[in-house]
């Protein structure tokens, strides 16, 4: 038994190193990308509000797109006209963020490293520069630390500074698996099914709002995207996702607004 312990530690160290390898991340990213495309192309989609999203995008030159952490797999499949509508995404430097970044790069989306904890100032400057240059940005406003389906203030900050609209995007797929043990209740869809991809109305944030008014607007946007997610899940027979869950790990403190 004493000889088995060092071997177990070595194996644990090996797999931990393998997980953090950029090579492993690239390979897994390619697999996830291929699976997302398979699901995207084989699902019978009902599209709600996508034309309006692109019309708003054309009219304003750029938008601020928000997607809940548990629904990040498939929205990129619906990102058309990449040259006409350039997009950058803020991604956490943590392990799950690295995986998301690998997938986004396969979709042709520019990745900006940062979160509310790490490289926050650098990331904010990069995102603002992207918007000023006419490039849209995507923010996962409840990641990487939760609580799930709770909107942080970051998207409102960029909307208020630039005058650009915030649009929420979500999706659901019939017979998909919901990983309810994970803090974000990640939805894992199966191919050859029925799905709904849906967008909220655009939200514009005035630079004249008081802090109380800004909080009301934040809650309005959060409610709109959450309710839309619940509605399409219900229509496709999925259970209601619990809102406000936090990761079990203590690495991430509770996110403030």
Image: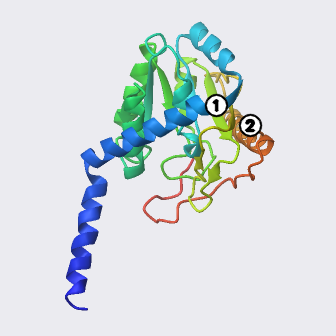
Q: Residues within 10 Å of mark 1 (few under 14, many from 20)?
A: many
Task: Confirm or deny contact between disc 1 and disc 2 (CB under 8 A).
Answer: yes
Q: Position of residue 153 (x, y in %)?
A: 57, 38
Query: On screen, 116 above or below 243?
Result: above
* In-image side of 223 versus 179 (left or right): right
Question: In terms of sequence position, does the residue under pointer 1 or pointer 2 come before the other?
Answer: 1
Left or right for 88, reference 9? right
Q: Where, quadrant-wise, is the C terminus in this rendering?
A: top right
Residue 228, numbered label: 2
Is residue 120 visible in this depiction of the protein? no
Q: Residue furthest top?
A: 59
Residue shown at the point (62%, 59%) measured from the top left: 180
Residue sitting at x 24%, y 84%? 5
Inter-mark Cα distance, 1 to 2: 9 Å
Q: Would you place residue 181 above or below residue 155 in this image?
A: below
Residue 119: image location, x then y, percent: 34, 41
Residue at (64, 35) in percent of width and height: 170
- Rendered residue at 80%/41% (across/down): 235
Q: Based on the displayed image, in which of its 4 quarters is residue 86 positioned?
A: top left
For this rendering, which residue is in front, 48 or 40? 40
Residue 182 picture location, percent across and down: 56, 59
- Count of numbered badges drawn on the protein: 2
For this rendering, which residue is in front, 152 or 207? 152
Residue situated furthest bottom in the rendering: 1
Badge 1 marks a residue whose secondary structure is: strand
Q: What residue is shown with label 1?
A: 168
């Amino acid at each position: 038994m004493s000889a088995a312990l060092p071997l177990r530690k070595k194996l644990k160290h090996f797999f931990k190193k393998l997980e953090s390898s950029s090579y492993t991340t690239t390979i897994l990213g390619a697999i996830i990308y291929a699976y997302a495309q398979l699901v995207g192309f084989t699902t019978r989609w009902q599209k709600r509000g996508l034309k309006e999203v692109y019309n708003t995008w054309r009219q304003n030159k750029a938008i601020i797109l928000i997607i809940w952490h548990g629904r990040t797999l498939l929205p990129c499949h619906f990102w058309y006209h990449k040259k006409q509508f350039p997009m950058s995404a803020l991604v956490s430097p943590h392990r799950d963020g690295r995986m998301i970044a690998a997938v986004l790069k396969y979709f042709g989306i520019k990745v900006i490293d940062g979160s509310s904890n790490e490289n926050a100032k650098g990331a904010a400057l990069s995102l603002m520069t992207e918007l000023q240059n006419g490039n849209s940005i995507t923010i996962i406003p409840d990641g990487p630390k939760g609580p799930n389906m709770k909107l942080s203030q970051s998207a409102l900050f960029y909307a208020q500074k630039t005058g650009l609209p915030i649009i929420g995007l979500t999706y659901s797929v019939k017979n998909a698996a919901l990983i309810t043990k994970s803090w974000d209740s990640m939805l894992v869809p199966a191919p050859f099914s029925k799905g709904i991809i849906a967008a909220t109305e655009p939200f514009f944030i005035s630079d004249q709002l008081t802090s109380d008014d800004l909080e009301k607007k934040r809650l309005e946007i959060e409610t709109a995207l959450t309710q839309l997610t619940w509605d399409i899940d219900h229509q496709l027979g999925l259970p209601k996702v619990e809102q406000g869950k936090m990761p079990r790990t203590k690495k991430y403190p509770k996110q403030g607004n």
